[in-house]
Image (tube, helix red, strand yellow):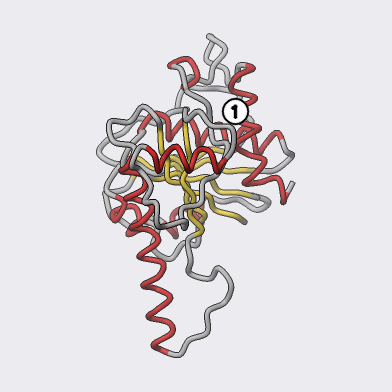
Amino acid sequence: MDVIVFAGSTARAARTSSSILLAAGAKSLGLEPLHVQVLTDGGVPALVDVTGVPFATSTLKAKRGEPITERTRTRARRGTSHVIVDMPAQDIRETLLMLGGMRPRILVLMPNWATDPGRAVSDFRIIREQRDHWEELNRQAGRPLADDYGRSRVWLFPIGWPAASSDDLRALLRGRGHLPSEDSQYPILYPGLPMLDPGDMEFTDGSGRFALTERQLEAAARTAWPLCGDTA
């Protein structure tokens, strides 16, 4: 079972929409995803009144910084292929505390319209530093490092950035001062998502039943394939 986490200190609505699109895309590949929305501070579930959702969903209420690993695992029924976790927009260190003991792949959202897109790079850097610190502690203790064990595989997840390739997007970000020119260790999950309109953040046919527009279907496919295509 693979765990994929949408995280970051920006893009609240876009983060939730992206995680739902990934769940829908994974389902279209023949997989059995579970979408878990983590709510803090009295947030409202995104799909609470939506019927006919084609994938399993769950809502998990927690305090900021409260570990959620075991509670997330208990929600994954037998046969679940991917657990897709929508974390709240918060300080990335709080997110890491809540994910303690989990071995996820983490997508740090980087929307083009955010007031400070560079915050995504900062969030990514914090996650990477935590991973490197974990590895160093194991080396000092003489413990072997199995592949990917205890490590978060982390990507920047662009939304609304115009680019012809991942290299073009990386160059564009460097040109705007969001990526350091001397560091190439910032993997980008390209192509990410196109610019999301308000209508792209709703998932019903007008009568409360789950439905995707043609634009949403395309976005779901382009999000799911690089993350889930190898297990479909």
Q: In which quarter of the image is residue 167?
A: top right
Camera-side residue of 17 and 75: 17
Quadrant of the image containing the N terminus: bottom right
Locate residue 32 relative to residue 151 in the image: left or right: right
Q: Position of residue 155 (x, y in %)?
A: 49, 50
**What residue sits right under mark 1 in the picture?**
219
Q: How crowded is mark 1: few (under 14 residues within 10 Å), some or many (20 or more)?
A: many
Residue that sits furthest to the top in the current view: 206
Camera-side residue of 220 and 100: 220
Q: Is mark 1 on a helix, strand or loop?
A: helix
* Type of amino acid at the residue the image marks with label 1: Ala
Q: Position of residue 107 (x, y in %)?
A: 47, 47
Please determine whether, in this image, residue 70 is positioned above or below residue 58.
below
Q: How many marks?
A: 1
Q: Image point 48% across, 23% down: which residue?
A: 195
Camera-side residue of 51 and 185: 185
Please determine whether, in this image, residue 94 is positioned above or below residue 208.
below
Camera-side residue of 84 and 199: 199
Q: Position of residue 152 (x, y in %)?
A: 48, 61
Q: Image point 65% across, 53% down: which residue?
A: 78
Q: Image point 42% across, 57% down: which residue?
A: 183
Q: In which quarter of the image is residue 11?
A: top left
Please determine whether, in this image, residue 2 is positioned above or below residue 177.
below
Q: Quadrant of residue 8?
A: top left
Locate residue 90 relative to residue 188 in the image: left or right: left
Q: Position of residue 112 (x, y in %)?
A: 40, 30
